[in-house]
Amino acid sequence: MLLFLSVPQPRPPGARTRARASRVARWRRQRLHRLRGLLRGLRGRPGTGSRRRSRMALCGQAAGAASLPSELIVHIFSFLSAPDRLRASASCSHWRECLFYPALWPQLRISLRVSPAEQPRLEFLMRKCGWFVRELRVEFAAENYLSGGGGPGDGADTGGGGEEVEALQLSTRWLEVLHTYLELVLCVLVSIRNNRNLQKFSLFGDISVLQQQGSLSNTYLSKVDPDGKKIKQIQQLFEEILSNSRQLRWLSCGFMLEIVTPTSLSSLSNSIANTMEHLSLLDNNIPGNSTLITAVELERFVNLCSLALDFCDFTAEMARVLTDSNHVPLQRLSLLVHNVSVMHKSLDNMPNDEHWKALSRKSTGLRVYIMAFDIKSEDMLKILKPSIPLERIHFDSYITCVSGAIVDLISRQYDKFLSHFILMNDVIDTSGFPDLSDNRNEDPLVLLAWRCTKLSLLAIHGYTVWAHNLIAIARLRGPDLKVLEVTEESIDFDQGELADQDVDPVHNLIEQVSLGLGQPWHAVMDIESLSVFTEPNRHFYREMQSFSEGI
């Protein structure tokens, strides 16, 4: 007699786990489907009234949105934009508690008006996120603080009664701006003083933007902070942040009114300095020959891939340090050349052509970005060494003008690298712009477009650009010239073009340039709409950031 027993076969390894995971995934999909309907109802999307009421009622049910675990709510928030997160958090207190979960805000990019109304909002945000945020970028913008005048103290020596009142009002506004600025900076620094997760820290402030007559007067600062206690507190907080950091890889500070001192970087531990990848220290308020970083201090930053400094601080000894074998190749170098720095500091210690050759050999991918504020032509001839791998250059002038010889030199020396060329002259009298092509057979800007085959951005204001030369530039570079920004008042026409009654010169210019570029083009009508013309410091700082991130 044969007896057949049915022996159950063992399940393959992991079968039960996969079945359970499948059920959990199906349950989560169902839940997410219901929550998407709830979010649409909360955002007020169109639908029947009964359907919206049923979705809103979910918050009050036992199995509704309020009973979801925090991890699932945070996961839902991760798919939403910041405004949608705020709207969704208004559904109930439980969702509101999940809004500022650290995983949802790994980075904060804040642009602040220097206004007392910003302080409570900034305090709330930094109190919620300052202790855990990994990437923090703050830009301070004193909007319209110069309305009615050209800078601090402008008009102070005028004789008219109305002008004296206006100067007094301007002085009062400056004091208010400085006081608010210091309070906002303190708020930011206090909130992150113990943040050890900070990896990227970037600060920009246009309070110390240099005006035509020099830097911001210390008289205003002494009235706001008579004993210098706030400035010292800000400097101590900044050094405390650096000393407490454990993961900092990116440190950038520009035009922040003495927040960085020559001793600030000594607060960084050797382990953090050795792993730093980007360092940007731009502040023209440092007196005398003192610098924010020395060549000896730079030796600690062996993994530095990107560096931004005042040009007068970048010495030949620094170039030698960066060519050492123990340093990784430098990829991006941004240099700010300002007439105030050139007046107080010497150009004798700058790298010569041999130093640039050695640096280029060490770092074959090195690219340089230079911004020049009111630099004389003779100084630019000293600065522009032939071996600099110059990719971007930005001229901004209030008093001096760039000569055609400088433009011609740039097109000859940097034809293999140059991709961005910005030429700005912020003149008050628009009746007579300087003409770079005066007494020349060829226009230097046309030669620039012809020689520099990688040119992708060209922006001009305050210099005469002849219409036929603009057409030639568009035809030479074609679609490779992605951005061509020329202000309307900078464009001039030949008498022959104006005398032709059958052709509208403006319409013909727009048509020919558009055909050359292969895309619609028009002159810049409103200069206020472009930060490259109205806010050169801010434009340079943002471009420097993207320039360094694009390694």
Image (cartoon, rainbow, N blue to C red):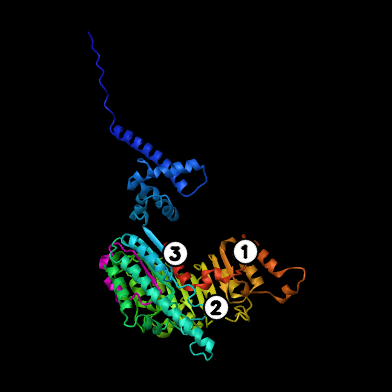
Sequence-first tag of 2 and 1: 2
Q: Circles 2 and 3: CB distance less than 8 Å? A: no
Residue 288 is left or right of residue 160, and the answer is: left
Q: Which amino acid does label 1 sit on?
A: Trp
Judged from this view, the residue extending furthest toward the right is 502
| Along the line of sight, the residue nearer the viewer: 85 or 214 | 85
Classify mark 3: residues with Cα within 10 Å, few (<14), some (14-19) or many (20+).
Answer: few
**Residue 224: x percent and y percent?**
37, 80
Residue 114 is left or right of residue 11, and the answer is: right
Residue at image point 38% right, 59% down: 107
**Residue 254: x percent and y percent?**
40, 72
Query: What range is drawn magenta here?
Result: 244-271
- Residue 193 is one of the magenta-drawn residues: no
**Residue at label 1?**
521
Quadrant in the picture for residue 524: bottom right
Q: What residue type is labelled 3?
A: Ser
Of badges 2 and 3, nearer the viewer stands 2
Q: What residue type is labelled 2?
A: Asp
Q: Distance between the residues labelled 2 and 3?
A: 25 Å
Q: How far apart are marks 2 and 1 (CA)?
A: 23 Å
Disc ID at residue 426: 2
Q: Circles 1 and 3: CB distance less than 8 Å? A: no
